[in-house]
Image (cartoon, rainbow, N blue to C red):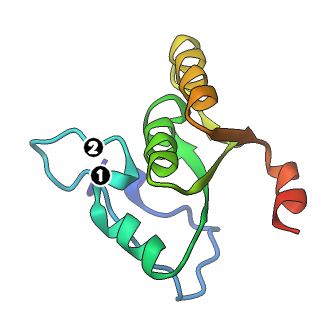
Amino acid sequence: MKNTSGANFQKDLYLNGKEYLIKKGENPLKEEFSAFANPDLDNFLKSNEITHTFIVGLAYDFCVGWSALDSAKSGYNTYVIKDACRSILSETTKEIEKYFETNNVKVINSNDLKHILS
């Protein structure tokens, strides 16, 4: 939640100063689960000729899922790294995975990255 300690980056996260931060959920009157709700994300990816997205975070069955679906809908090769995510409910996890299957979102684990990126 914005302006709480939970909104801070984890203290051991390595940042090199080249990160580009794109926020979502800035409008308190509008629910925004997908990172693509902020058009700056799509604009940034397209302007930098990025073709693949790798999505991680909380919650797998909501924000991660909706972001992945919007990523695929926007034409990106979309991967969700499942072991770098956490779900809220098993029921919604099964539901979002059905949407992944029918919308070209690939679910992988972090150890699969070396094969994809090589």
Q: Residue at x 55, y 34 (%)?
A: 103
Q: Quadrant of residue 107?
A: top right
Asked if 40 appears above or below 64 in the picture, the reply is: below
Q: Can you give x and y, in whole percent of width and height, for residue 79 in the image? A: 66, 48
Q: Amino acid at mark 2?
A: Glu
- What residue is drawn where x is 38% and y is 66%? 41
Q: Amino acid at mark 1?
A: Ala
Of the numbered discs in the image, which one, if any, rests on residue 32?
Answer: 2
Label 2 secondary element: loop
Q: Do the CB atoms of the residues marked 1 and 2 lie less than 8 Å apart? A: yes
Q: In this figure, what is the number of numbered marks?
A: 2
- Identified at 14% across, 52% down, the residue is 27
Disc sitting over residue 37 in the figure: 1
Question: How many C-alpha atoms fall within 10 Å of the one at disc 1: few (<14), some, or many (≥20)?
Answer: some
Percent across and percent down for residue 36 are: 36, 54
In this picture, is 95 found above or below 61? above
Relative placement, left or right, of 9 versus 14 is: left
Residue 74 horizontal/vertical position (percent): 44, 53
Q: Position of residue 73 (x, y in %)?
A: 45, 46
In this view, the residue in front, 106 or 28, is: 106
Specify whether 117 is left or right of 1. right
Mark 1 vs mark 2, CA separation in Å = 6 Å
Query: In which quarter of the view is residue 40 placed?
Result: bottom left
